[in-house]
Image (spheres, helix red, strand yellow):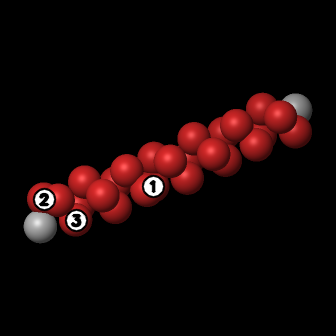
Amino acid sequence: MGKAYSEDLRERVEARIASGHSRRDAA
């Protein structure tokens, strides 16, 4: 359970970072 949770959390963080970079590039 903890492993799956950490993996899901990591995916969310990566998606957030990716969207943040795209926003910076767009700006």
Residue receiving disc 3: 4
Please provide percent x and percent y for residue 1: 12, 67
Q: Quadrant of residue 24?
A: top right
Distance in Å between CA atoms under marks 3 and 2: 6 Å
- Viewer-proximal residue among 27 and 7: 7
Disc 3 + disc 2, Cβ < 8 Å: yes
Q: Residues within 10 Å of mark 2 (few under 14, many from 20)?
A: few
Q: Quadrant of the C terminus?
A: top right
From the top left corner, tell me how far across and down residue 15 is, in percent.
55, 53
The outermost residue toward the left is 1
**Vertical arrangement, residue 20 with respect to residue 14, above or below:** above
Q: Mark 1 or mark 2, which has the lower sequence index? A: 2
Q: Is residue 25 left or right of residue 3?
A: right
Q: Tell me which amino acid carries mark 1.
A: Arg
Q: Residues within 10 Å of mark 1 (few under 14, many from 20)?
A: few
Residue name at image x 22 percent, y 65 percent: 4
Tell me whether the residue at label 1 lies in contact with that at label 2, contact meaning CB atoms closer than 8 angstroms. no
Mark 1, residue position: 12
Left or right: 14 in relation to 10: right
Label 2: which secondary element: helix
Q: Secondary structure at mark 3?
A: helix
**Which secondary structure, mark 1?**
helix
Identify the residue at horizontal 13%, vertical 59% (top origin).
2
Mark 3: amino acid: Ala
Could you tell me how far apart the alpha carbons at marks 1 and 2 are, in whole angstroms?
15 Å
